[in-house]
C-alpha cells in the first residue's frame, strides 16, 4: 500500500457530519486497482529492458571524389524506466577520418584457405588446377660451359635470358635444355623477342641500351643513354626504358634509335610498366597522376590518380621505391609491402595482398606480367599471383611470366611451362 492508499484509508475512517457522496467507495476501489495494474506493467517492462542484448553496428560511409569517410556506431538503448527522460531511439556516434588521395573500392581477396596454394603442392600441380598446361620443359641451371645460370628475363616466345657469375649472358629456347652463352656481358636491362636480344651496356657511370638481331648486327637504341640498372620492358617488338633523366624512351626493335616518349613538356613521367602498345608513366612530382600512353602515336590514352599507396614526390622526403607490371587485362603494383591489382578496362575494383616479402639487400625488385599470371621478384622470395582467382604462391627463387609462359625454380634447375 502506497501513500495515496494510506491517506484514503485515513479519510474514510474519520467521522463526517454527513454521509459520503453516493458511489465514492466504488470509485476509490477502481482507482486503486488501476494504479496497481499500472505498477505491475511498468515493473515487467523494466525487467524486459534489463535483459535486452545491446549490439553496436559500425557503418562505414565513403564519400565520392576523395571526401572523408564517416563511421557511425548505432547502439540501441534499453527501454525507458519510470521517471527517466531518456529516449528509446538509437544513439549515433559519428567520427570522420581522412581518406587516401585516390578513393577506390577495395575488393577483399578470397578466403585465405582458398587462395594460397597448399603446402607441399608443387607449382606445376597448382598451375594445372588453374589453367590448361600445354607443355612443361626443363631448363638447366648451368650453361654449356658449366657456369651457373640465373634467369633474368623471359620473352613472350618462351626464350629465357640470364647471366652467369662473371656477367656473361646466356639463353635457352622455349624447348628448354642447356643455356648457351651469347658472347656479350650484361648485368641488367635484359630483354628478348623473336628476332632480337637487348641489354644495358655499362661504361663507367654511363649506360646505353644495345640491341642485336638474329644475324648478329648490333646497335645502340637508347636515344640519350639509359638508366644504369633500370628495368627494361619488351613487348610487341618494342623496347621501353628510362633515360638518365628518368624520361621514358621506346624503340621498335633494333632497326633504329628510339625516341623519348612525351606528351608535353616536361616529359610524361617515369616509365613503370609496359604492355604493348601502352606505356604506364608515373608523374609523381608535377601533376601527380599515372598516364597511359600509346607508344605508336605518343598520345595519352588515359590518366588516373597515382595508384593507392604511391605517394607524391616532394623535395623534403626520400624517393619512394615502388614497382609495377601490366598485361593486356591487368595492372599490378607493390608499394610499402602491399601488392595491389585491378582490371585495366574498368580501373577497379582493387584487390590487395599485404605483407609481401621485403627485397634482398642490394637487390632492386622487379615485376613481370604474362597474359594471365603476374610475378614479383625480390632477389630471394618471389610471389606468383593469378589476379583472376586471387591464388598466390611463394617461391624461394626467381619466377618470371611473359605471354603464355611461366618460368620457376625447381630442384637443381628450372621449369618452363606453356599455359593456355
Image: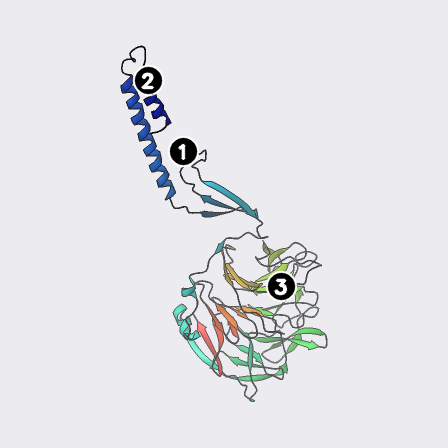
Q: Looking at the image, is 27 positioned above or below residue 362?
A: above
Q: What residue did someone put label 3 on? A: 271
Task: Give the mark, 3 or 2, whose residue is nearer the N terminus.
Answer: 2
Q: Which residue is mark 2?
A: 14
Q: Residue at x 56, y 72 (%)?
A: 378
Please state if 197 lies on the left or on the right of 26 as rendered: right
Which residue lies most toward the top here?
Answer: 18
Q: CA distance from mark 3 to mark 1?
A: 71 Å
Q: CA distance from mark 1 to mark 2?
A: 34 Å
Q: Nearer the viewer, residue 358 or 15?
A: 15
Q: Return the residue found at the far bottom.
A: 145
Q: Earlier in the sequence, mark 3 or mark 1?
A: 1
Residues at badges 1 and 2 in contact (C-beta under 8 Å)?
no
In the image shown, does 222 or 5 lie closer to the viewer? 5
Q: Residue at x 34, y 25 (%)?
A: 5
Is residue 364 visible in this depiction of the protein? yes
Judged from this view, the residue extending furthest toward the front is 15
Could one spot residue 402 in this view of the protein?
A: no
Q: Which label number is shown at residue 39?
A: none
Quadrant where the C terminus sits is bottom left
- Whether label 3 touches label 2, CB < 8 Å: no
Label disc, if present, on residue 82 of the rendered structure: 1
Give the side of residue 126 with respect to residue 359, left or right: left
259 lies left or right of 130: right
Q: Secondary structure at mark 1?
A: loop
Q: Label 3 crowding class (10 Å Cα cut-off): few <14, some 14-19, many 20+?
A: many
Dot 1 or dot 2: first in sequence order is 2
Amino acid at each position: 500500500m502506497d501513500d495515496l492508499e494510506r491517506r484514503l484509508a485515513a479519510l474514510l475512517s474519520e467521522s463526517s457530519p454527513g454521509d459520503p457522496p453516493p458511489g465514492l467507495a466504488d470509485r476509490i476501489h477502481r482507482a486503486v486497482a488501476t494504479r496497481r495494474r499500472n505498477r505491475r506493467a511498468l515493473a515487467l517492462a523494466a525487467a524486459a529492458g534489463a535483459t535486452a542484448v545491446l549490439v553496436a553496428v559500425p557503418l562505414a560511409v565513403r564519400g565520392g571524389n576523395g571526401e572523408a569517410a564517416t563511421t557511425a556506431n548505432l547502439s540501441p538503448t534499453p527501454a525507458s524506466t519510470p521517471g527517466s527522460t531518456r529516449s528509446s531511439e538509437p544513439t549515433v556516434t559519428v567520427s570522420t577520418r581522412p581518406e587516401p588521395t585516390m578513393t577506390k573500392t577495395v575488393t577483399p581477396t578470397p578466403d585465405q584457405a582458398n587462395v594460397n596454394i597448399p603446402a607441399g603442392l608443387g607449382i606445376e600441380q597448382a598451375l594445372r588446377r588453374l589453367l590448361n598446361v600445354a607443355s612443361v620443359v626443363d631448363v638447366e641451371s648451368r650453361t654449356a660451359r658449366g657456369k651457373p645460370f640465373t634467369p633474368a628475363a623471359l620473352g613472350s616466345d618462351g626464350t629465357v635470358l640470364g647471366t652467369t657469375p662473371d656477367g656473361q649472358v646466356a639463353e635457352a629456347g622455349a624447348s628448354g635444355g642447356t643455356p648457351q652463352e651469347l658472347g656479350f656481358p650484361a648485368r641488367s636491362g635484359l630483354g628478348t623477342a623473336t628476332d632480337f636480344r637487348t641489354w644495358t651496356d655499362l661504361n663507367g657511370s654511363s649506360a646505353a641500351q644495345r640491341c642485336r638481331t638474329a644475324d648478329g648486327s648490333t646497335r645502340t637504341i637508347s636515344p640519350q643513354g639509359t638508366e644504369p640498372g633500370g628495368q627494361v620492358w619488351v613487348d610487341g617488338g618494342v623496347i621501353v626504358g628510362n633515360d638518365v633523366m628518368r624520361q621514358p624512351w621506346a624503340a621498335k626493335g633494333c632497326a633504329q634509335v628510339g625516341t623519348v616518349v612525351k606528351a608535353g613538356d616536361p616529359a610524361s613521367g617515369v616509365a613503370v610498366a609496359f604492355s604493348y602498345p601502352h606505356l604506364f608513366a608515373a608523374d609523381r612530382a608535377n601533376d601527380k597522376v599515372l598516364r597511359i600512353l600509346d607508344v605508336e602515336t605518343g598520345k595519352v590514352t588515359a590518366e588516373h590518380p597515382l595508384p593507392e599507396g604511391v605517394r607524391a614526390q616532394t623535395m623534403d622526403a626520400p624517393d619512394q621505391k615502388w614497382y609495377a607490371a601490366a598485361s593486356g587485362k591487368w595492372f599490378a603494383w607493390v608499394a610499402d609491402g602491399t601488392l595491389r591489382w585491378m582490371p585495366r578496362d574498368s580501373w577497379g575494383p582493387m584487390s590487395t595482398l599485404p605483407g609481401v616479402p621485403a627485397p634482398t639487400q642490394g637487390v632492386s625488385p622487379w615485376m613481370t606480367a604474362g597474359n594471365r599470371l603476374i610475378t614479383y621478384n625480390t632477389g630471394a622470395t618471389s610471389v606468383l599471383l593469378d589476379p583472376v582467382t586471387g591464388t598466390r604462391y611463394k617461391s624461394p627463387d626467381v619466377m618470371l611470366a611473359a605471354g603464355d609462359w611461366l618460368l620457376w625454380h625447381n630442384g637443381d634447375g628450372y621449369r618452363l611451362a606453356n599455359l593456355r
